[in-house]
């Protein structure tokens, strides 16, 4: 099968690729009671019982969740994928373009978003306008695409069938408040947050799972630079030597040149945190920008919802990210 070709570099795409720095993106509207929410599976296969439990939580918030047609599919030969690439991309495009849908929330992460990202109809996405989009982990590939190919702010937050969303009340409340009362969650960071490198910086948020952020390097619409951005990074299952390699790749590529500040989330299953911390300090501490660790987002027992594409201030002394405006309008 012929690999998909990038669409013509025009409009928002061309501007995004050529931008020298990170800019604030268009924020979608907050949700209202009764809003319809589409659940999609851009990455790995979704356990049905977890999906049902997550949908019940959304209904308890007075939302109207609808499940995209291929969410419970499994790829016929590649068991780590939730169905065929084109089917997963079509689910996302159709959900976004449905005028009755106010938000699109991913069912889970896993593997596979990079395989389908170029199959999404980004022209149609732009024409449909901004909507709430939620996910994390493998979904980082789509957060970057929404930023660079549509110009939309998104939410790095828990997914409907993810364990943390189902088990942790604080995780759920962070997402619920962001969706319905975004002005109430403009200062972000758990009590564990502290300075890895001192300072205070203003910028626009971006980032996600660091391995996915690095994997986007060299792709047709990959971000050329995090200049002026507040880079939020976390990961799961990457041992310290692999994190060293990933961060070194980002440094060598110039992706981190001019970054304003860095916020770090969880490093679940990445080895003893003392070893992980040593790598983070070694690779990021020399950038001369504030770095805040253990902010409480990502693959952690409590995972705060972090807006991407929104301006704010990262303060290493207080261990907080304070948004200039609410995540949603």
Image (cartoon, helix red, strand yellow):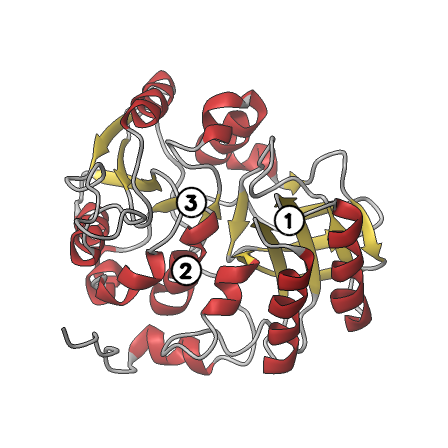
Instruction: Name the residue rendered at 24%, 59% in the picture.
Output: 125
Residue 315 visible in the snapshot: no
Distance of label 1 from label 3 (alpha carbons): 21 Å
The mark nearer the N terminus, 3 or 2, is 3
Which residue, given by chain and number where applicable, does mark 2 sit on?
141
User: CB of mark 2 within 8 Å of CB of mark 1?
Assistant: no
Instruction: Name the residue rendered at 44%, 31% in the picture.
Output: 180
User: On the rendered image, what quadrant is the N terminus found in?
Assistant: bottom left
Q: Dot 3, crowdedness within 10 Å: few (<14), some or many (≥20)?
A: many
User: CB of mark 1 within 8 Å of CB of mark 3?
Assistant: no
- Which one is nearer the viewer's eye here, 106 or 307? 106
Residue 207 visible in the snapshot: yes
Relative image position of residue 322 (x, y in whole percent): 67, 47
Distance of label 2 from label 1 (alpha carbons): 21 Å
Relative image position of residue 273 (x, y in whole percent): 75, 46
Instruction: Tell me if 110 is positioned left or right of 287 in this view.
Output: left
User: On the rendered image, what quadrant is the C terminus found in?
Assistant: top left
| Residue 145: quarter of image | bottom left
Q: Nearer the viewer, mark 2 or mark 1?
A: 1
| Residue 220: quarter of image | bottom left
The mark nearer the N terminus, 1 or 3, is 3
Instruction: Name the residue rendered at 33%, 55% in the picture.
Output: 112
Relative image position of residue 314 (x, y in whole percent): 72, 54
Find numbered disc 1 in the image and state the secondary structure of the residue it sits on. loop
Q: Dot 2, crowdedness within 10 Å: few (<14), some or many (≥20)?
A: many
- Which one is nearer the viewer's eye here, 201 or 65? 65
Which residue, given by chain and number where applicable, does mark 3 sit on?
135
The dot on residue 270 is: 1
Distance of label 3 from label 2 (alpha carbons): 10 Å
Instruction: Tell me if 122 is positioned left or right of 194 in this view.
Output: left
Instruction: Tell me if 309 is positioned left or right of 75 in this view.
Output: right
């Amino acid at each position: 099968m012929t690999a998909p070709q990038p669409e013509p570099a025009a409009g928002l795409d061309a501007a995004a690729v050529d931008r020298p720095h990170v800019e604030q993106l268009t924020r979608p509207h907050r949700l209202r009671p009764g809003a319809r929410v589409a659940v999609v599976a851009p990455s790995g296969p979704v356990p049905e019982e977890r999906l049902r439990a997550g949908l019940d939580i959304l209904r308890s918030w007075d939302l109207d969740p609808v499940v995209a047609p291929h969410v419970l599919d499994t790829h016929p030969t590649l068991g780590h994928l939730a169905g065929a690439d084109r089917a997963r991309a079509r689910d996302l495009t159709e959900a976004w373009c449905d005028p009755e849908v106010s938000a699109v929330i991913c069912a889970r992460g896993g593997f596979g978003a990079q395989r389908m990202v170029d199959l999404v109809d980004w022209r149609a996405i732009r024409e449909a306008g901004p909507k709430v989009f939620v996910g994390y982990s493998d979904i980082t590939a789509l957060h970057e695409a929404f930023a660079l190919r549509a110009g939309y702010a998104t939410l790095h937050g828990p997914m409907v069938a993810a364990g943390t969303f189902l088990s942790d009340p604080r995780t759920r409340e962070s997402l619920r408040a962001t969706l319905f009362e975004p002005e109430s969650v403009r200062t972000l960071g758990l009590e564990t947050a502290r300075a890895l490198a001192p300072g205070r910086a203003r910028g626009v948020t971006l980032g996600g799972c660091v391995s996915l952020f690095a994997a986007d390097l060299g792709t047709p619409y990959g971000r050329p630079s995090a200049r002026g951005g507040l880079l939020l990074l976390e990961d799961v299952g990457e041992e310290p030597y692999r994190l060293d390699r990933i961060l070194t790749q980002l440094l060598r590529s110039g992706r981190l040149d001019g970054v304003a500040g860095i916020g770090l989330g969880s490093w679940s299953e990445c080895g003893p945190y003392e070893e992980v911390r040593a790598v983070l300090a070694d690779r990021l501490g020399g950038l001369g920008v504030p770095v805040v660790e253990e902010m409480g987002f990502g693959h952690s027992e409590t995972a705060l919802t972090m807006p991407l594409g929104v301006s704010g201030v990262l303060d290493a002394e207080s261990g907080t990210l304070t948004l200039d405006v609410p995540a949603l309008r």
